[in-house]
Image: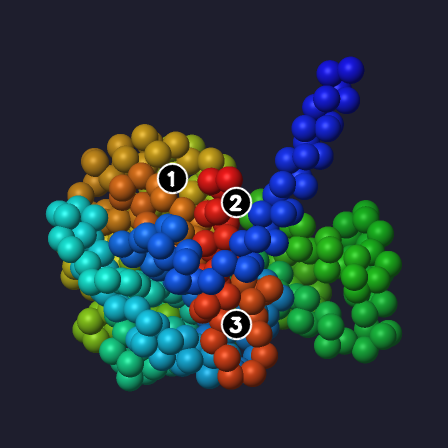
Amino acid sequence: MWTGIRRFHELMKNIAKRFMRSVSKLIPLWMYRRLFPRDLTAFFYHAVSDEAMPHVKHLYPPTPVERFENALIYLRRHFNPVSYAEVHAHVVNGASLPARAVHLSFDDGFGECYTVARPLLLKYEMPCTFFVATDWIDNQAMFYRNKVSVCIEALRGLDKDAKAMLLNSLTNVLDRTLRSAGEFEDWIRSLVHADEATIDMTCKMLGIDIPAYMQERNVFLTSEQLKEMAADGFTIGSHTRSHPKLGQVSAAEMETEIVESARIVQAITGDEVAPFSFPFSAFGIERAVLADIRGRNPILGLFFDTKGLQMDVDFIVNRIWAEKAEFSEAGRRTNIPQLLKAAYGELLLLRS
């Protein structure tokens, strides 16, 4: 009996959620702004490029240059861009922000932040914070997920016979049957940081030289580029050293990743304080632990997460991810209005 009641309640809850999702799409932005007034809206990107980025394209869609420029135009027309320093002063000291304040940032530290995004940001006088995983600066290492993307791209470029030979070789080495390119992609996407040796072996079997690939394509920002961007007036922040899921490591490991990365950023920029953004998200991390880490390390500024317009503890600023695949539209349009509506819709669902 009780099982049946629980199932009925769960069914009704799912029906209500689907109804609210449908309703949320009908509410105009101006009404959302009145329902959920915000001091600050923040967006973040990873990569802006019209060129092929094999190390990114099978993880999420890089933003085309024209769409990014249109986003900057939209934000300039409908918002008031603010710098990290202004956001920090608002959160820490209570300084006022202009109406419809917006802050832009990039995570990871891909080279296109300098070659593609920077000129457009300067053109439109758009403040921006660049959060970098410091182990990757100067192309010293590549994130395992970027290697996975490169492997998928390489396999797709092989002819039928070469694919079959590779899949057969992997089947023999792994003691796991991979019968098709689809099974290969599902398998390699399932690998995690602890499987990096297997990913590296797969790269070699595909003829991929990761260090050469990074140097040839300038995958990540260099120290000199970061210094120049800081001199431009942009803020450089920490994104940990190696981009782990911080909710899955010890408090001591978490502190080391965050603080050492911030110190490396400080050595490059000369700034006294470095803001920090979470790799993946801050899901599963106790806020009291984060507050303790910040309290004992004055080098750390505000923390930035990925939960759209949701509120958190006072030192965490949430941001809207601008590269969500479902809003990756073709053509010249900007996807900012759609992203905003979706973020407000998520708030509506949370509060309903």
Q: Which mark is residue 254?
A: 1
Which residue is under mark 3? Answer: 62
Comparing 30 with 98, the one in front is 30
The residue positioned 27% from the left and 41% from the top of the image is: 314
Q: Amino acid at mark 1?
A: Met
- Mark 3 crowd level (few <14, some 14–19, many ≥20, 10 Å Cα): many
Comparing 263 with 168, the one in front is 263
Q: Secondary structure at mark 1?
A: helix
The residue positioned 67% from the left and 50% from the top of the image is: 190
Q: Quick one: quadrant of the N terminus? A: top right
Which residue is under mark 2? Answer: 349
Q: Secondary structure at mark 2?
A: helix
Q: Earlier in the sequence, mark 2 or mark 1?
A: 1
Question: Residue 186, percent across and down?
Answer: 73, 55
Q: Earlier in the sequence, mark 3 or mark 2?
A: 3
The residue positioned 68% from the left and 66% from the top of the image is: 152
Q: Mark 3 against mark 2, which lies toward the viewer?
A: 2
Question: Residues at badges 1 and 3 in contact (C-beta under 8 Å)?
Answer: no
Comparing 158 with 208, the one in front is 158
Q: Earlier in the sequence, mark 1 or mark 3?
A: 3
Instruction: Name the side, left or right, on which 192 lies relative to 92.
Output: right
